[in-house]
C-alpha cells in the first residue's frame, strides 16, 4: 500500500481503538439512565483487526428500538470504510485519477472502489444538505460523532429503523 493510504489506515485504527468506550445514550429516545449492557459484537477495524462493540438494551418502554450500540469514532454503520477513507478516495477521483490507479493506491478492487465512490458522492451531498459545516468529522472525535452516525444510518439505511 502507498505510504499515505497506509498511514491513514494506521491512524484510523488507533483513533477507533482509543474511542471504544463512549458515554452511552440511546440514539433513538435519548435515554441516558435506564439501559444495561447487552452483549457485544465484533467488527473489523481498517487494518483487519477485530474489536468488540458493546451493545446496550434500552429499558424505556416508549423507545422504538430496544437495543443499540455506540460506534467508536471513525467507524461508520454497516460500511467497512471510514468517512475519511471514502473522502480520500473521492478526492483522488475528482482530481482526475483513474479508478484503476485508485485501486492500486488503496490495494483494493474495482467493484469496491466503484461502490465507495458512489457512496462517497451521496454522503458528501447529504452532509452538505444536513449540516451547516464544510468539513467532515474525520479525524476529530467528539460529541458530534454519535449523532452523526445516527443521522447517517437514518438517511442511508432507513429500513433498519422500521
Image (spheres, rainbow, N blue to C red):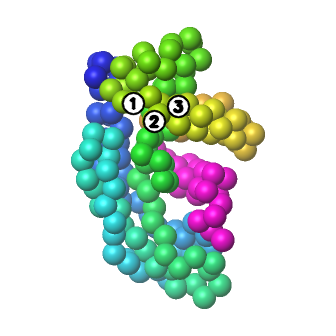
Residue located 34% across and 66% down the image = 41
- Give the side of residue 60 with respect to residue 108, left or right: right
Residue 160 drawn above or below residue 13: below
- Range of magenta residues: 141-162
**Distance from the alpha carbon under mark 2 to that under mark 1:** 6 Å
Give the camera-side residue of 159 and 61: 159
Q: Which mark is residue 57?
A: none
Residue 25 on the magenta span = no
CB within 8 Å, label 2 to label 1: yes
* Helix, strand or loop: magenta stretch: helix
Nearest the eye: 116 or 40:
116
Q: Residue 37 is drawn in which quadrant?
A: bottom left
Where is residue 78? Give x, y as percent.
Answer: 48, 53
Give left or right: position of 88 versus 155: left
Which residue is painted at 36% across and 38% down in the image?
12
- Checking the image for residue 109, the label placed there is 1
Q: CA distance from mark 3 to mark 2?
A: 5 Å
Res 112 label: 2
- Considering only vertical position in the picture, is 10 above or below 99? below
* Mark 3 → mark 1, Cα distance in angstroms: 9 Å
Q: Which residue is mark 3?
A: 114
Tag 1's secondary structure?
Answer: loop
**Contact (CB < 8 A) between labels 3 and 2?**
yes
Amino acid at each position: 500500500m502507498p505510504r499515505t493510504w497506509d498511514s491513514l489506515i494506521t491512524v484510523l485504527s488507533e483513533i477507533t481503538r482509543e474511542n471504544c468506550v463512549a458515554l452511552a445514550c440511546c440514539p433513538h429516545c435519548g435515554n441516558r439512565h435506564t439501559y444495561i449492557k447487552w452483549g457485544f459484537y465484533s467488527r473489523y477495524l481498517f487494518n483487519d483487526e477485530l474489536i468488540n462493540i458493546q451493545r446496550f438494551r434500552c429499558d424505556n418502554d416508549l423507545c422504538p428500538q430496544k437495543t443499540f450500540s455506540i460506534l467508536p469514532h471513525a467507524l461508520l454503520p454497516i460500511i467497512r470504510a471510514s468517512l475519511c477513507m471514502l473522502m480520500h478516495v473521492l478526492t483522488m477521483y475528482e482530481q482526475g485519477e483513474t479508478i484503476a490507479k485508485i485501486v492500486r493506491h488503496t490495494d483494493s478492487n474495482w467493484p469496491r472502489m466503484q461502490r465507495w465512490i458512489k457512496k462517497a458522492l451521496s454522503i458528501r451531498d447529504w452532509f452538505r444538505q444536513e449540516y451547516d459545516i464544510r468539513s467532515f468529522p474525520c479525524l476529530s472525535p467528539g460529541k458530534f460523532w454519535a449523532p452523526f452516525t445516527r443521522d447517517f444510518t437514518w438517511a442511508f439505511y432507513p429500513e433498519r429503523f422500521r
